[in-house]
């Protein structure tokens, strides 16, 4: 199938309905049917169950249990770095945010203002900062971890479309990550503000955080905002789990620090692992 036809089908398909059905199936505890589907998925995507804390496929009662499986903790040691990679996946893009614009792919940029759901004051904090976009494939580990320690101050659910977020769609759909549904998690740290934006996609039936549980579904027409005061005590250490996808998707990390020095090994398409060195923070 040509790239143009693939993209056209993404525009035409009933993405919300497909995702609703997929979400229902993913949470269904269907016994032998679920076990067979999980086994077929693991073969199709060559999932390495040797890394899972529970390697036996029949131990997972639902697809969601399988998708969000824990890893053996010794397999993801934390690097000694200011910033560690929050996910298993691949680098999409990274670098400086220039004048409030984030680079998506050749010929495509989108604004921090759009990404965070139209909050101009919040967006301005990142306008000249740094970003990293990380893609999680269906075979990857689907939990998201903290790149550094931080205190949660805000969470925003931004409704939107549900295009696929694979590299092809990133190249062909303008403003992809700022038009898809997403959950924006904003943290305060001793070194400044940072945010992890969990971007939804077609078939990604749910996005959850460790402090809230499932954020979506339900899906609303307007943004939902939660603010957390200091006495709420939601502080997470570097490397701690902060959320999860019920299938692969994309995380956009934003830092208000304009001098993030990403590790020299990074380039678009390079595989990354949670806990690996991501970069260091420069003086501001």
Image (cartoon, grey):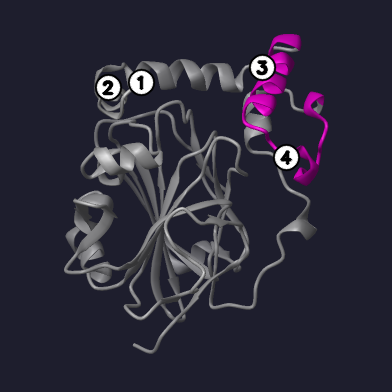
Q: Which residues are magenta?
A: 32-58
Coordinates of residue 228 in the picture (x, y in percent): 42, 59
Coordinates of residue 232 in the picture (x, y in percent): 51, 61
Q: Is residue 168 above or below residue 43?
A: below
In-image side of 15 versus 114 (left or right): right
Q: Are marks 2 and 4 in contact (CB under 8 Å)?
A: no
Coordinates of residue 89 in the picture (x, y in percent): 54, 50
Q: Is residue 228 magenta?
A: no
The residue under label 4 is 48
Instruction: Give SS at disc 4.
Output: loop
Quadrant location of the N terminus? top left
Could you say which quadrant of the image residue 19 lies in?
top left
**Residue at position x 54%, y 78% from top?**
82
Labels 1 and 4: the sequence-earlier one: 1
Q: CA distance from mark 2 to mark 4?
A: 32 Å
The residue under label 1 is 1
Label 1 CA crowd tier, 10 Å (few <14, some 14–19, many 20+)? few
Q: CA distance from mark 4 to mark 3?
A: 16 Å
Number of labelled discs? 4
Q: Is residue 39 above or below residue 207?
A: above
Q: Is residue 80 visible?
A: yes
The residue under label 3 is 37
In-image side of 202 versus 239 (left or right): left
Q: CA distance from mark 2 to mark 3?
A: 28 Å
The residue under label 2 is 5
**Residue at position x 40%, y 67% from top?**
194
**Residue at position x 29%, y 31% from top?**
161
Q: Nearer the viewer, mark 2 or mark 4?
A: 2
Instruction: Give SS at disc 2.
Output: helix
Near-viewer residue (132 or 6): 6
Q: Are marks 2 and 1 in contact (CB under 8 Å)?
A: yes
Quadrant location of the C terminus? bottom left
């Amino acid at each position: 199938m040509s790239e143009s036809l693939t993209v056209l089908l993404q525009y035409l398909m009933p993405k919300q309905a497909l995702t609703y059905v997929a979400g229902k199936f993913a949470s269904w505890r269907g016994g032998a049917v679920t076990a067979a589907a999980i086994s077929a998925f693991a073969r199709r995507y060559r999932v390495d169950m040797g890394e899972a804390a529970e390697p036996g496929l029949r131990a997972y009662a639902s697809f969601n249990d399988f998708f969000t499986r824990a890893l053996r903790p010794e397999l993801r040691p934390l690097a000694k770095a200011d910033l560690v990679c929050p996910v298993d996946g691949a680098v999409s893009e990274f670098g400086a945010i220039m004048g409030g614009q984030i680079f998506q792919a050749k010929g495509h940029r989108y604004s921090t203002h759009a990404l965070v759901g139209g909050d101009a004051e919040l967006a301005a904090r990142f306008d000249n900062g740094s970003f990293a976009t990380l893609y999680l494939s269906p075979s990857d580990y689907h939990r998201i971890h903290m790149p550094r320690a931080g205190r949660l101050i805000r969470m925003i659910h931004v409704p939107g479309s549900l295009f696929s977020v694979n590299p092809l769609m990133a190249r062909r759909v303008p403003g992809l990550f700022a038009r898809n549904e997403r959950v924006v998690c904003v943290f305060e740290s001793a070194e400044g503000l940072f945010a992890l934006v969990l971007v939804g996609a077609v078939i990604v039936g749910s996005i959850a955080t460790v402090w809230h549980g499932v954020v979506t579904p339900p899906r609303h027409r307007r943004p939902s905002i939660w603010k957390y005061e200091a006495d709420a005590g939601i502080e997470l250490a570097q490397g701690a789990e902060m959320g999860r996808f019920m299938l692969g998707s994309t995380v956009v990390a934003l830092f208000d620090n304009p001098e993030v020095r990403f590790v020299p090994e990074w380039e678009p398409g390079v595989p990354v692992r949670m806990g690996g060195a991501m970069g260091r923070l420069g003086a501001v």
